[in-house]
Image (cartoon, rainbow, N blue to C red):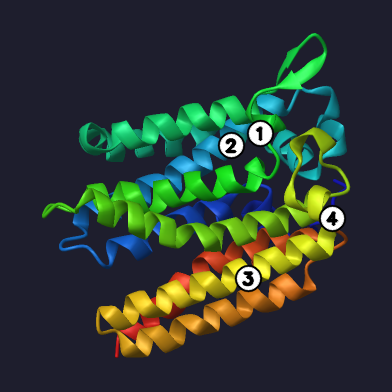
Amino acid sequence: MDGSVRNPVLRWLIYGHVWVALAVGAQSWWTSLFLHEGGLARRYALAATLGGFTAYGVTRLARMGAKEAAEYANLKWYKANRSIMYALVGLCGAAAFVLMWPLWPRIWPVLLPMTVLTFFYVTPFSFNGRGIGLREVPFLKAVLIAVVWSVVTVAVPMLLDPVGQPVLAIIGYTCMRIPLILALAILFDVRDQPTDDPALRTVPLVLGVNGAKAAAFVLLLCSAVFEVLFLRGLGYTTAAWTILVGYVFALALCVRAKPERDAFFYAILVDGVMIAVPLCGWLGTLW
């Protein structure tokens, strides 16, 4: 099968969206570490990992028969592995449903609006031949991704804290995560800049590649400052230093990002920042 990713393990991680699903779980797990009792949040982190894999899988399986499927390596890979992917997506979806079922009464007021918002963005609407709706708002693509990811991985786990968290604390901690995800979303827009529909008005399409990279760099610095202040405020002095290793890695990727980079650079390294940052921080909490 033709495709830019030759290694079979990397194909599963990238085309099968296993890596990005693990990133959802890592970000949710990072939030759970700072709750009064994180058992329910860790259960949610596992459900979010399985649910992320399922969501991406359903999208890819639905698009396998589309005319443009032959142009995309991930859709060709899904088509070649359709039987096992149908089974895995079904099993993971069922497992996520079982894990989430007892948590749903606490989290649906937050998760449901995020689902609706995402639907109205990814679905193109037009009137008299002209595009209308959320897709027409400049810069919204990256901002929406950042907000949805942050709410899913921060606000929702905090709602599961048995002691209860003040609404302002939930909003504040969620906003603290947005710069990291927004920076990475902008880097992915850099990747997609040559092929994105101009109607999406992404950051690189408006500011150019260098302007988008500069914006992502500043956002990563802001995120690093927030994390350091947060960890030092909780007394995790060592973690406040070790987490910076993850941010140095992210900043290096930001500098090197360009549309011509391969799938490994974006789907493994850039997405991997969402795993590397909490991992580096967690290691610091062990001392």
Measured in 3D between alpha carbons, the distance from the residue under mark 3 to the one under mark 1, in whole angstroms, is: 33 Å
Among the 4 quarters of the image, the one containing residue 260? bottom right
Numbered label attached to residue 218: 3
Q: Residue beneath label 1, please?
A: 60
Mark 3 or mark 1, which has the lower sequence index? Answer: 1
The residue drawn where x is 26% and y is 57% is 169
In screen coordinates, is 61 left or right of 239?
right
Measured in 3D between alpha carbons, the distance from the residue under mark 2 to the one under mark 3, in whole angstroms, is: 33 Å
Q: Residue beneath label 2, please?
A: 57
Measured in 3D between alpha carbons, the distance from the residue under mark 2 to the one under mark 4, in whole angstroms, is: 20 Å
Is disc 2 placed on a helix, strand or loop? Answer: helix
Specify whether residue 258 is in view.
no
**Circles 2 and 1 in contact, beta carbons < 8 Å:** yes
Mark 2 or mark 4, which has the lower sequence index? Answer: 4
Q: What residue type is labelled 3?
A: Val
Instruction: Tell me if residue 102 comes above or below residue 25 in the rendering.
Output: above
Q: What residue type is labelled 2?
A: Gly
Q: Which amino acid does label 4 sit on?
A: Ser
The residue drawn where x is 37% and y is 84% is 239
Q: Residue beneath label 4, please?
A: 4
Is disc 3 placed on a helix, strand or loop? Answer: helix
Mark 3 or mark 4, which has the lower sequence index? Answer: 4
In screen coordinates, is 106 left or right of 211?
left
Q: Residue 73 at what x, y percent from top left?
A: 80, 44
Q: Which amino acid does label 1 sit on?
A: Arg
